[in-house]
Image (cartoon, helix red, strand yellow):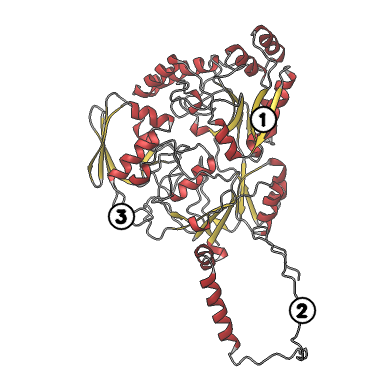
Amino acid sequence: MQLRPSLLTPRPSPPRLQRSTPAPGCPRTSKRMPNPMPRPVRLLIAATLLATALPAGQAAAQTATRASTLRVAPETLTRVLDPHFTTSFTTRDFAYLVFDTLVAVNDRWEPTPQMLERWERSADGLTWTFTLREGLAWHDGQPVTAEDCVASIRRWGARDALGGAMMRATAALEVVDAKTFRLTLREPFGLVLQALGKPGAMVPMMMPARLAATPPMQQIPEVIGSGPYIFAADEYRPGDRIVVRRNPAYRPRSEPPVWASGGKAARMERVELIAMPDVSTQVSALTTGEIDYVERLPADVLPVLERNRAVRVATVSSYGYQGILRFNHLHPPFDNPQVRRAVMLAVNQADYLAAVAGRPEFARECRSMFGCGTPLESTAGMPERADFAAAQRMLRESGADLSTPIVIIHPADAPGIAALGLVSQDLLTRLGLRVDLQSMDLNTYFGRRARMDGWNLAHTTNTVPDMQSPLLNPFVNGSGRQGGFAGWPQDAEVERRRAEFARAQDDAARKRISDEIHRRAAEGGFYMPLGQFTAASAWRSELNGVLTGPAMFLWNISRN
Protein backbone atom coordinates (compact mmCIF):
# COMPACT_ATOMS: atom_id res chain seq x y z
CA MET A 1 0.00 0.00 0.00
CA GLN A 2 1.31 3.43 -0.88
CA LEU A 3 1.00 5.90 2.02
CA ARG A 4 -0.39 9.35 1.24
CA PRO A 5 2.00 12.17 2.25
CA SER A 6 0.72 14.30 5.12
CA LEU A 7 -0.65 17.73 4.30
CA LEU A 8 0.63 19.07 7.60
CA THR A 9 4.26 18.01 7.60
CA PRO A 10 7.10 19.22 5.42
CA ARG A 11 8.20 16.94 2.62
CA PRO A 12 11.99 17.12 2.48
CA SER A 13 13.66 15.82 -0.65
CA PRO A 14 15.29 12.44 -0.12
CA PRO A 15 19.05 12.69 0.36
CA ARG A 16 21.16 11.84 -2.64
CA LEU A 17 23.19 8.71 -2.09
CA GLN A 18 26.86 8.91 -3.00
CA ARG A 19 29.12 5.96 -3.62
CA SER A 20 32.15 5.88 -1.43
CA THR A 21 35.49 5.48 -3.09
CA PRO A 22 37.80 2.97 -1.43
CA ALA A 23 41.32 3.98 -0.59
CA PRO A 24 44.01 2.81 -3.01
CA GLY A 25 44.75 -0.84 -2.53
CA CYS A 26 41.51 -1.49 -0.61
CA PRO A 27 38.97 -3.59 -2.51
CA ARG A 28 35.27 -2.71 -2.52
CA THR A 29 33.18 -4.96 -0.33
CA SER A 30 29.50 -5.29 0.50
CA LYS A 31 30.20 -7.35 3.57
CA ARG A 32 28.90 -5.70 6.78
CA MET A 33 30.76 -5.91 10.04
CA PRO A 34 28.75 -7.70 12.71
CA ASN A 35 27.18 -5.52 15.39
CA PRO A 36 27.39 -7.23 18.75
CA MET A 37 24.64 -5.02 20.27
CA PRO A 38 21.10 -6.58 20.19
CA ARG A 39 18.68 -4.81 17.85
CA PRO A 40 16.13 -3.82 20.57
CA VAL A 41 18.93 -2.13 22.52
CA ARG A 42 20.13 -0.31 19.40
CA LEU A 43 16.60 0.97 18.74
CA LEU A 44 16.20 2.16 22.31
CA ILE A 45 19.49 4.06 22.17
CA ALA A 46 18.58 5.59 18.80
CA ALA A 47 15.21 6.76 20.11
CA THR A 48 16.84 8.26 23.18
CA LEU A 49 19.41 10.12 21.09
CA LEU A 50 16.67 11.40 18.78
CA ALA A 51 14.58 12.70 21.67
CA THR A 52 17.54 14.48 23.25
CA ALA A 53 18.48 16.00 19.89
CA LEU A 54 14.99 17.37 19.22
CA PRO A 55 14.14 20.95 20.11
CA ALA A 56 12.04 21.13 23.27
CA GLY A 57 8.81 21.81 21.38
CA GLN A 58 9.21 18.85 19.06
CA ALA A 59 10.09 16.54 21.93
CA ALA A 60 6.97 17.68 23.80
CA ALA A 61 4.89 17.21 20.67
CA GLN A 62 5.99 13.58 20.45
CA THR A 63 4.68 12.88 23.95
CA ALA A 64 1.14 13.80 22.87
CA THR A 65 -0.51 11.21 20.67
CA ARG A 66 -2.57 12.12 17.65
CA ALA A 67 -5.69 11.07 19.56
CA SER A 68 -5.00 13.66 22.26
CA THR A 69 -4.24 16.46 19.78
CA LEU A 70 -6.95 18.70 18.34
CA ARG A 71 -5.95 20.16 14.98
CA VAL A 72 -8.02 23.17 13.91
CA ALA A 73 -8.08 25.17 10.69
CA PRO A 74 -9.41 28.63 11.63
CA GLU A 75 -10.72 30.94 8.95
CA THR A 76 -7.52 32.97 9.28
CA LEU A 77 -4.50 32.67 11.55
CA THR A 78 -3.55 35.81 13.41
CA ARG A 79 -0.02 36.97 14.16
CA VAL A 80 -1.32 39.10 17.05
CA LEU A 81 -1.45 37.16 20.31
CA ASP A 82 -2.34 40.09 22.58
CA PRO A 83 -6.08 39.85 23.44
CA HIS A 84 -6.32 43.60 24.12
CA PHE A 85 -4.69 44.66 20.86
CA THR A 86 -7.02 43.66 18.02
CA THR A 87 -10.57 42.63 17.19
CA SER A 88 -9.28 39.66 15.15
CA PHE A 89 -11.46 36.55 15.58
CA THR A 90 -8.47 34.21 15.71
CA THR A 91 -6.79 36.38 18.33
CA ARG A 92 -9.97 36.15 20.40
CA ASP A 93 -10.33 32.38 19.91
CA PHE A 94 -6.67 31.77 20.74
CA ALA A 95 -6.96 34.04 23.79
CA TYR A 96 -9.93 32.07 25.11
CA LEU A 97 -7.66 29.02 25.32
CA VAL A 98 -4.78 30.72 27.12
CA PHE A 99 -6.37 33.52 29.14
CA ASP A 100 -9.46 33.66 31.35
CA THR A 101 -12.10 36.23 32.26
CA LEU A 102 -13.54 37.43 35.54
CA VAL A 103 -17.12 37.04 34.30
CA ALA A 104 -18.62 34.99 31.47
CA VAL A 105 -22.05 34.91 29.85
CA ASN A 106 -24.16 31.87 29.09
CA ASP A 107 -26.55 31.34 26.18
CA ARG A 108 -29.16 33.53 27.89
CA TRP A 109 -26.68 36.43 28.10
CA GLU A 110 -26.61 36.11 31.89
CA PRO A 111 -23.30 37.18 33.51
CA THR A 112 -21.89 34.38 35.66
CA PRO A 113 -18.69 34.20 37.77
CA GLN A 114 -15.65 32.74 36.01
CA MET A 115 -12.39 33.72 37.72
CA LEU A 116 -14.49 35.36 40.39
CA GLU A 117 -15.93 33.62 43.40
CA ARG A 118 -18.52 36.34 43.94
CA TRP A 119 -19.36 40.02 43.60
CA GLU A 120 -21.26 42.48 45.75
CA ARG A 121 -23.06 45.63 44.61
CA SER A 122 -23.94 48.54 46.87
CA ALA A 123 -27.56 49.67 47.23
CA ASP A 124 -26.95 52.77 45.08
CA GLY A 125 -25.25 50.67 42.36
CA LEU A 126 -22.05 52.75 42.46
CA THR A 127 -19.72 50.37 44.31
CA TRP A 128 -18.83 46.88 43.17
CA THR A 129 -16.62 44.54 45.20
CA PHE A 130 -15.13 41.52 43.46
CA THR A 131 -13.52 38.47 45.09
CA LEU A 132 -11.36 35.98 43.17
CA ARG A 133 -11.84 32.25 43.63
CA GLU A 134 -9.13 30.16 45.24
CA GLY A 135 -6.44 28.28 43.38
CA LEU A 136 -5.96 30.59 40.39
CA ALA A 137 -2.41 30.68 39.05
CA TRP A 138 -0.63 32.12 36.04
CA HIS A 139 1.15 29.77 33.68
CA ASP A 140 4.49 30.84 35.17
CA GLY A 141 3.34 29.47 38.54
CA GLN A 142 2.64 32.80 40.23
CA PRO A 143 -0.75 33.24 41.95
CA VAL A 144 -3.40 35.44 40.34
CA THR A 145 -3.92 38.54 42.49
CA ALA A 146 -6.34 41.44 42.62
CA GLU A 147 -3.48 43.70 41.54
CA ASP A 148 -3.19 41.70 38.29
CA CYS A 149 -6.91 42.05 37.62
CA VAL A 150 -7.00 45.80 38.28
CA ALA A 151 -4.08 46.33 35.89
CA SER A 152 -5.70 44.10 33.25
CA ILE A 153 -9.05 45.93 33.44
CA ARG A 154 -7.30 49.28 33.03
CA ARG A 155 -5.38 48.11 29.98
CA TRP A 156 -8.43 46.52 28.36
CA GLY A 157 -10.51 49.64 29.12
CA ALA A 158 -8.01 51.75 27.20
CA ARG A 159 -8.65 49.69 24.04
CA ASP A 160 -12.26 48.45 24.09
CA ALA A 161 -15.33 50.57 23.35
CA LEU A 162 -17.49 49.18 26.16
CA GLY A 163 -14.52 48.97 28.51
CA GLY A 164 -13.68 52.60 27.77
CA ALA A 165 -17.25 53.67 28.57
CA MET A 166 -17.05 51.84 31.90
CA MET A 167 -13.70 53.39 32.78
CA ARG A 168 -14.97 56.89 31.96
CA ALA A 169 -17.75 56.31 34.49
CA THR A 170 -15.25 55.02 37.09
CA ALA A 171 -14.03 57.12 40.00
CA ALA A 172 -11.69 54.48 41.46
CA LEU A 173 -10.51 50.96 40.74
CA GLU A 174 -8.41 49.75 43.64
CA VAL A 175 -7.00 46.68 45.36
CA VAL A 176 -8.56 45.74 48.72
CA ASP A 177 -6.41 42.68 49.43
CA ALA A 178 -4.71 39.88 47.50
CA LYS A 179 -8.04 38.36 46.41
CA THR A 180 -10.36 41.40 46.43
CA PHE A 181 -10.67 44.62 44.44
CA ARG A 182 -13.26 47.37 44.30
CA LEU A 183 -14.77 49.39 41.45
CA THR A 184 -16.31 52.72 42.48
CA LEU A 185 -18.38 54.59 39.88
CA ARG A 186 -18.65 58.35 39.73
CA GLU A 187 -21.97 58.03 37.91
CA PRO A 188 -24.43 55.21 37.22
CA PHE A 189 -23.26 52.62 34.71
CA GLY A 190 -25.76 49.84 34.18
CA LEU A 191 -23.49 47.44 32.28
CA VAL A 192 -20.62 46.61 34.63
CA LEU A 193 -21.10 42.82 34.54
CA GLN A 194 -21.99 42.88 30.85
CA ALA A 195 -18.71 44.71 30.17
CA LEU A 196 -16.55 42.34 32.21
CA GLY A 197 -18.29 39.32 30.65
CA LYS A 198 -18.54 40.39 27.01
CA PRO A 199 -17.73 37.35 24.83
CA GLY A 200 -16.53 39.19 21.74
CA ALA A 201 -13.37 41.02 20.84
CA MET A 202 -11.88 42.76 22.60
CA VAL A 203 -12.56 40.31 25.43
CA PRO A 204 -11.52 41.54 28.91
CA MET A 205 -8.91 38.83 29.44
CA MET A 206 -6.83 38.88 32.62
CA MET A 207 -3.02 38.80 32.56
CA PRO A 208 -0.20 39.34 35.08
CA ALA A 209 0.22 42.97 36.17
CA ARG A 210 3.73 43.11 34.70
CA LEU A 211 2.28 42.33 31.25
CA ALA A 212 -0.76 44.56 31.75
CA ALA A 213 1.71 47.41 32.35
CA THR A 214 2.58 47.22 28.63
CA PRO A 215 1.31 50.42 26.95
CA PRO A 216 -2.05 49.73 25.28
CA MET A 217 -0.68 50.64 21.85
CA GLN A 218 2.12 48.07 22.18
CA GLN A 219 1.72 44.30 22.17
CA ILE A 220 2.58 42.35 25.30
CA PRO A 221 6.12 40.89 25.14
CA GLU A 222 5.11 37.38 26.21
CA VAL A 223 1.92 35.34 26.41
CA ILE A 224 1.11 34.33 29.99
CA GLY A 225 -2.46 33.60 31.01
CA SER A 226 -4.27 31.48 33.58
CA GLY A 227 -6.56 29.56 31.21
CA PRO A 228 -6.95 25.85 30.45
CA TYR A 229 -4.11 25.80 27.91
CA ILE A 230 -0.55 27.15 27.91
CA PHE A 231 0.93 28.90 24.87
CA ALA A 232 3.77 26.79 23.44
CA ALA A 233 6.17 29.59 22.54
CA ASP A 234 8.82 27.08 21.43
CA GLU A 235 6.47 25.69 18.78
CA TYR A 236 5.03 28.98 17.56
CA ARG A 237 5.51 29.54 13.83
CA PRO A 238 4.05 32.97 12.97
CA GLY A 239 1.61 32.75 10.10
CA ASP A 240 1.82 28.94 10.03
CA ARG A 241 0.63 27.52 13.35
CA ILE A 242 -0.10 28.31 16.97
CA VAL A 243 0.18 25.50 19.50
CA VAL A 244 -1.14 25.33 23.06
CA ARG A 245 -0.65 22.57 25.63
CA ARG A 246 -2.97 21.48 28.41
CA ASN A 247 -2.48 23.37 31.66
CA PRO A 248 -2.27 20.66 34.36
CA ALA A 249 -2.69 23.27 37.11
CA TYR A 250 -5.95 24.69 35.77
CA ARG A 251 -8.98 24.21 38.01
CA PRO A 252 -12.18 24.34 35.93
CA ARG A 253 -15.39 25.48 37.50
CA SER A 254 -17.86 22.80 38.52
CA GLU A 255 -20.77 24.16 36.44
CA PRO A 256 -21.37 22.63 32.98
CA PRO A 257 -19.86 24.60 30.07
CA VAL A 258 -22.30 26.89 28.26
CA TRP A 259 -20.78 29.34 25.78
CA ALA A 260 -17.86 31.00 27.62
CA SER A 261 -19.27 30.17 31.07
CA GLY A 262 -18.88 27.15 33.33
CA GLY A 263 -16.13 24.56 33.49
CA LYS A 264 -13.40 24.81 30.86
CA ALA A 265 -12.15 21.23 30.82
CA ALA A 266 -9.01 20.77 28.74
CA ARG A 267 -9.69 17.23 27.53
CA MET A 268 -7.07 17.39 24.76
CA GLU A 269 -3.35 17.48 25.56
CA ARG A 270 -2.69 19.86 22.67
CA VAL A 271 -4.59 22.20 20.39
CA GLU A 272 -2.94 23.23 17.13
CA LEU A 273 -4.31 26.20 15.18
CA ILE A 274 -3.02 25.66 11.64
CA ALA A 275 -2.95 28.10 8.73
CA MET A 276 -4.76 26.43 5.85
CA PRO A 277 -6.32 29.15 3.68
CA ASP A 278 -7.08 26.91 0.70
CA VAL A 279 -10.59 25.46 1.05
CA SER A 280 -9.89 22.35 -1.01
CA THR A 281 -6.93 21.58 1.24
CA GLN A 282 -9.15 22.02 4.31
CA VAL A 283 -11.75 19.62 2.92
CA SER A 284 -9.14 17.03 1.98
CA ALA A 285 -7.38 17.24 5.35
CA LEU A 286 -10.67 16.99 7.24
CA THR A 287 -11.79 14.03 5.14
CA THR A 288 -8.57 12.11 5.75
CA GLY A 289 -8.47 13.02 9.45
CA GLU A 290 -5.28 15.09 9.26
CA ILE A 291 -7.22 17.95 10.82
CA ASP A 292 -10.18 17.68 13.15
CA TYR A 293 -12.09 20.96 12.92
CA VAL A 294 -12.64 23.64 10.27
CA GLU A 295 -14.03 26.88 11.60
CA ARG A 296 -15.84 28.28 8.56
CA LEU A 297 -16.58 26.73 5.19
CA PRO A 298 -18.19 28.10 2.02
CA ALA A 299 -21.54 26.60 1.15
CA ASP A 300 -20.41 25.09 -2.14
CA VAL A 301 -18.22 22.47 -0.42
CA LEU A 302 -20.79 21.45 2.19
CA PRO A 303 -22.57 18.75 0.11
CA VAL A 304 -19.33 16.78 -0.15
CA LEU A 305 -18.84 16.85 3.61
CA GLU A 306 -22.50 16.27 4.45
CA ARG A 307 -22.36 12.95 2.61
CA ASN A 308 -19.31 11.86 4.62
CA ARG A 309 -20.23 9.91 7.75
CA ALA A 310 -16.82 10.64 9.25
CA VAL A 311 -17.58 14.37 9.29
CA ARG A 312 -20.25 16.44 11.00
CA VAL A 313 -21.39 19.79 9.55
CA ALA A 314 -23.21 22.29 11.77
CA THR A 315 -23.69 25.98 12.53
CA VAL A 316 -22.30 26.72 15.98
CA SER A 317 -23.59 30.31 16.22
CA SER A 318 -27.23 30.97 15.40
CA TYR A 319 -26.62 34.73 15.54
CA GLY A 320 -23.92 34.61 12.91
CA TYR A 321 -22.11 37.58 11.44
CA GLN A 322 -22.81 41.05 10.13
CA GLY A 323 -21.06 42.19 6.96
CA ILE A 324 -19.70 45.73 7.23
CA LEU A 325 -18.79 48.38 4.66
CA ARG A 326 -16.76 50.99 6.54
CA PHE A 327 -15.96 54.46 5.24
CA ASN A 328 -12.85 56.43 6.20
CA HIS A 329 -14.46 59.70 7.30
CA LEU A 330 -11.17 61.61 7.40
CA HIS A 331 -10.43 61.82 3.67
CA PRO A 332 -12.26 62.61 0.42
CA PRO A 333 -14.62 61.55 -0.93
CA PHE A 334 -16.08 59.93 2.20
CA ASP A 335 -15.52 62.99 4.36
CA ASN A 336 -18.67 64.15 2.54
CA PRO A 337 -21.78 62.66 4.20
CA GLN A 338 -23.74 62.87 0.96
CA VAL A 339 -21.23 60.58 -0.76
CA ARG A 340 -21.46 58.10 2.11
CA ARG A 341 -25.24 58.11 1.97
CA ALA A 342 -25.17 57.65 -1.81
CA VAL A 343 -23.11 54.47 -1.52
CA MET A 344 -25.38 53.20 1.28
CA LEU A 345 -28.41 53.83 -0.93
CA ALA A 346 -26.80 51.84 -3.77
CA VAL A 347 -26.08 48.76 -1.64
CA ASN A 348 -28.15 45.71 -2.50
CA GLN A 349 -27.59 43.35 0.41
CA ALA A 350 -28.67 40.34 -1.63
CA ASP A 351 -25.51 40.71 -3.75
CA TYR A 352 -23.27 40.60 -0.70
CA LEU A 353 -25.15 37.77 0.98
CA ALA A 354 -24.92 35.62 -2.13
CA ALA A 355 -21.15 36.07 -2.02
CA VAL A 356 -20.64 35.16 1.65
CA ALA A 357 -23.57 32.93 2.66
CA GLY A 358 -24.02 30.70 -0.38
CA ARG A 359 -27.27 29.15 0.87
CA PRO A 360 -30.58 30.97 1.39
CA GLU A 361 -30.97 29.47 4.87
CA PHE A 362 -27.66 31.04 5.90
CA ALA A 363 -28.60 34.57 4.77
CA ARG A 364 -30.81 37.34 6.13
CA GLU A 365 -31.17 40.87 4.83
CA CYS A 366 -30.70 43.15 7.83
CA ARG A 367 -30.14 46.90 7.93
CA SER A 368 -29.77 47.16 11.68
CA MET A 369 -26.40 48.22 13.02
CA PHE A 370 -27.30 46.31 16.18
CA GLY A 371 -28.15 43.10 14.32
CA CYS A 372 -31.48 41.44 13.69
CA GLY A 373 -33.09 39.23 16.30
CA THR A 374 -31.45 41.24 19.11
CA PRO A 375 -33.33 43.29 21.74
CA LEU A 376 -32.14 46.61 20.27
CA GLU A 377 -32.76 45.81 16.60
CA SER A 378 -33.51 49.02 14.68
CA THR A 379 -33.50 50.37 11.14
CA ALA A 380 -33.93 54.02 12.14
CA GLY A 381 -32.17 56.31 9.67
CA MET A 382 -31.27 53.56 7.20
CA PRO A 383 -32.30 53.57 3.53
CA GLU A 384 -35.38 51.36 3.28
CA ARG A 385 -34.18 49.66 0.12
CA ALA A 386 -31.53 49.91 -2.56
CA ASP A 387 -32.12 52.58 -5.22
CA PHE A 388 -29.22 52.66 -7.65
CA ALA A 389 -30.55 55.50 -9.84
CA ALA A 390 -31.19 57.71 -6.81
CA ALA A 391 -27.68 56.92 -5.55
CA GLN A 392 -26.19 58.10 -8.84
CA ARG A 393 -28.15 61.36 -8.64
CA MET A 394 -27.03 61.90 -5.06
CA LEU A 395 -23.40 61.42 -6.08
CA ARG A 396 -23.72 63.98 -8.88
CA GLU A 397 -25.36 66.45 -6.51
CA SER A 398 -22.74 65.97 -3.79
CA GLY A 399 -20.24 68.25 -5.50
CA ALA A 400 -17.43 65.90 -4.44
CA ASP A 401 -14.36 65.36 -6.60
CA LEU A 402 -14.70 61.75 -7.69
CA SER A 403 -11.69 61.62 -10.02
CA THR A 404 -9.25 60.24 -7.45
CA PRO A 405 -9.31 56.44 -7.13
CA ILE A 406 -10.97 55.05 -4.02
CA VAL A 407 -8.56 52.76 -2.17
CA ILE A 408 -10.19 49.59 -0.84
CA ILE A 409 -7.91 47.61 1.48
CA HIS A 410 -8.60 43.98 0.68
CA PRO A 411 -7.55 40.99 2.87
CA ALA A 412 -7.39 38.39 0.12
CA ASP A 413 -6.61 35.53 2.52
CA ALA A 414 -9.81 36.07 4.54
CA PRO A 415 -12.51 34.67 2.21
CA GLY A 416 -15.47 35.93 4.22
CA ILE A 417 -14.18 39.51 4.09
CA ALA A 418 -12.60 39.39 0.64
CA ALA A 419 -15.90 38.41 -0.99
CA LEU A 420 -17.50 41.61 0.33
CA GLY A 421 -14.72 43.75 -1.14
CA LEU A 422 -15.17 42.28 -4.60
CA VAL A 423 -18.89 43.09 -4.57
CA SER A 424 -18.15 46.67 -3.51
CA GLN A 425 -15.51 47.03 -6.21
CA ASP A 426 -18.15 46.18 -8.81
CA LEU A 427 -20.77 48.41 -7.18
CA LEU A 428 -18.56 51.50 -6.99
CA THR A 429 -17.33 51.00 -10.54
CA ARG A 430 -20.93 50.86 -11.79
CA LEU A 431 -21.62 54.06 -9.84
CA GLY A 432 -18.92 55.73 -11.94
CA LEU A 433 -16.16 55.82 -9.33
CA ARG A 434 -12.56 54.80 -9.88
CA VAL A 435 -11.48 51.95 -7.61
CA ASP A 436 -8.04 50.83 -6.46
CA LEU A 437 -8.45 47.41 -4.81
CA GLN A 438 -5.24 46.79 -2.85
CA SER A 439 -4.84 43.13 -1.88
CA MET A 440 -2.88 42.05 1.18
CA ASP A 441 -2.91 39.43 3.92
CA LEU A 442 -5.19 39.86 6.92
CA ASN A 443 -2.49 40.88 9.37
CA THR A 444 -1.26 43.59 6.99
CA TYR A 445 -4.88 44.66 6.54
CA PHE A 446 -5.34 45.19 10.28
CA GLY A 447 -2.19 47.30 10.36
CA ARG A 448 -3.32 49.39 7.37
CA ARG A 449 -6.83 49.83 8.74
CA ALA A 450 -5.42 51.22 11.99
CA ARG A 451 -3.69 54.02 10.05
CA MET A 452 -5.74 57.15 9.53
CA ASP A 453 -4.50 57.65 5.97
CA GLY A 454 -3.84 55.46 2.96
CA TRP A 455 -7.34 54.02 2.53
CA ASN A 456 -10.92 55.07 1.81
CA LEU A 457 -13.00 51.93 2.24
CA ALA A 458 -12.63 48.73 4.27
CA HIS A 459 -14.78 45.68 4.81
CA THR A 460 -15.01 43.30 7.70
CA THR A 461 -17.38 40.94 9.45
CA ASN A 462 -18.24 40.90 13.11
CA THR A 463 -20.28 38.52 15.21
CA VAL A 464 -23.77 39.87 15.80
CA PRO A 465 -23.46 39.54 19.60
CA ASP A 466 -20.57 42.01 19.37
CA MET A 467 -22.77 44.53 17.55
CA GLN A 468 -25.97 44.41 19.58
CA SER A 469 -25.72 47.67 21.53
CA PRO A 470 -24.27 51.18 21.09
CA LEU A 471 -21.51 50.38 23.58
CA LEU A 472 -20.61 46.94 22.25
CA ASN A 473 -20.58 47.99 18.59
CA PRO A 474 -17.26 49.80 17.96
CA PHE A 475 -18.49 51.07 14.60
CA VAL A 476 -21.01 53.45 16.20
CA ASN A 477 -18.30 55.14 18.25
CA GLY A 478 -18.52 58.84 17.35
CA SER A 479 -15.32 60.03 19.04
CA GLY A 480 -13.44 60.74 15.81
CA ARG A 481 -9.65 60.90 15.86
CA GLN A 482 -9.42 60.93 19.65
CA GLY A 483 -10.72 57.65 20.99
CA GLY A 484 -12.62 56.56 17.88
CA PHE A 485 -12.44 53.33 15.92
CA ALA A 486 -10.98 52.78 12.43
CA GLY A 487 -12.97 54.99 10.05
CA TRP A 488 -13.17 57.67 12.76
CA PRO A 489 -16.65 59.20 12.40
CA GLN A 490 -17.11 62.16 14.72
CA ASP A 491 -20.46 63.14 16.22
CA ALA A 492 -20.70 64.71 19.67
CA GLU A 493 -24.43 63.98 19.87
CA VAL A 494 -23.87 60.26 19.33
CA GLU A 495 -21.27 60.28 22.10
CA ARG A 496 -23.61 62.15 24.45
CA ARG A 497 -26.32 59.59 23.77
CA ARG A 498 -23.95 56.66 24.25
CA ALA A 499 -23.04 58.02 27.68
CA GLU A 500 -26.76 58.36 28.42
CA PHE A 501 -27.28 54.75 27.31
CA ALA A 502 -24.58 53.62 29.75
CA ARG A 503 -26.35 55.39 32.63
CA ALA A 504 -29.79 53.98 31.79
CA GLN A 505 -31.12 51.59 34.41
CA ASP A 506 -33.93 49.80 32.54
CA ASP A 507 -34.49 48.13 29.19
CA ALA A 508 -37.17 50.55 27.99
CA ALA A 509 -34.86 53.54 28.43
CA ARG A 510 -32.00 51.71 26.70
CA LYS A 511 -34.22 50.87 23.74
CA ARG A 512 -35.38 54.47 23.31
CA ILE A 513 -31.84 55.85 23.50
CA SER A 514 -30.37 53.20 21.21
CA ASP A 515 -32.97 53.98 18.52
CA GLU A 516 -31.90 57.64 18.62
CA ILE A 517 -28.23 56.67 18.38
CA HIS A 518 -28.98 54.34 15.47
CA ARG A 519 -30.84 57.07 13.57
CA ARG A 520 -28.04 59.56 14.04
CA ALA A 521 -25.27 57.12 13.11
CA ALA A 522 -27.15 55.83 10.04
CA GLU A 523 -27.98 59.29 8.76
CA GLY A 524 -24.35 60.28 9.29
CA GLY A 525 -23.17 57.27 7.28
CA PHE A 526 -21.03 55.75 10.01
CA TYR A 527 -21.08 52.47 8.07
CA MET A 528 -23.37 50.30 5.96
CA PRO A 529 -24.48 46.85 7.20
CA LEU A 530 -24.24 44.34 4.35
CA GLY A 531 -26.64 41.77 5.78
CA GLN A 532 -26.53 39.05 8.39
CA PHE A 533 -25.34 35.53 7.71
CA THR A 534 -24.35 32.33 9.41
CA ALA A 535 -21.61 29.95 8.36
CA ALA A 536 -21.13 26.23 8.76
CA SER A 537 -18.30 24.63 10.68
CA ALA A 538 -17.24 21.01 10.25
CA TRP A 539 -15.45 18.54 12.48
CA ARG A 540 -14.62 14.86 12.67
CA SER A 541 -17.54 12.75 13.90
CA GLU A 542 -15.45 11.11 16.61
CA LEU A 543 -15.22 14.44 18.45
CA ASN A 544 -17.51 14.89 21.45
CA GLY A 545 -18.46 18.00 23.40
CA VAL A 546 -18.12 20.63 20.65
CA LEU A 547 -19.59 23.82 22.10
CA THR A 548 -21.87 26.33 20.42
CA GLY A 549 -21.60 30.07 20.94
CA PRO A 550 -20.55 33.40 19.45
CA ALA A 551 -16.85 32.41 19.40
CA MET A 552 -14.93 29.22 18.64
CA PHE A 553 -14.70 27.61 22.08
CA LEU A 554 -12.24 24.69 21.87
CA TRP A 555 -12.27 23.31 25.39
CA ASN A 556 -14.53 20.42 26.52
CA ILE A 557 -13.74 18.51 23.31
CA SER A 558 -12.75 14.86 23.51
CA ARG A 559 -12.33 12.05 21.01
CA ASN A 560 -14.08 8.66 20.94
* Mark 2 to mark 1 CA distance (whole Å): 58 Å
Q: How many marks?
A: 3
Nearest the eye: 411 or 390 = 411
**Residue 421 has which mark?**
1
Rendered image: mark on residue 19? 2
Mark 3 or 2: the one toward you: 2
Q: Which mark is residue 135?
A: 3
Identify the mark nearer the N-term, 1 or 3: 3
Residue type at mark 3 is Gly
Image point (70%, 32%), residue name: 354
Label 3 to label 2: alpha-carbon separation: 63 Å
458 left or right of 25? left
Task: Work out whether residue 440 or residue 297 is closer to the camera in this orientation and state it.
Answer: 440
Can residue 320 be seen here? The reply is no
Residue 459 coordinates in the image, percent (x, y): 61, 30
Residue located at (74% from left, 19% from top): 430
Residue at the spot x=51%, y=43% of the render? 80
Q: Residues within 10 Å of mark 2 (few under 14, many from 20)?
A: few
Q: Circle 1 sits in a helix, a strand or a loop, which is it?
A: helix
Left or right for 30, reference 263: right
Residue type marked 1: Gly
**Could you say which is closer to the camera, residue 166 or residue 106?**
166
In this view, the mark in front (1 or 3): 1
Q: Secondary structure at mark 2?
A: loop
Contact (CB < 8 A) between labels 1 and 3? no
Q: Nearer the viewer, residue 497 or 79?
A: 79
Q: Amino acid at mark 2?
A: Arg
Label 2 vs 1, first from the N-terminus: 2
Q: Secondary structure at mark 3?
A: loop
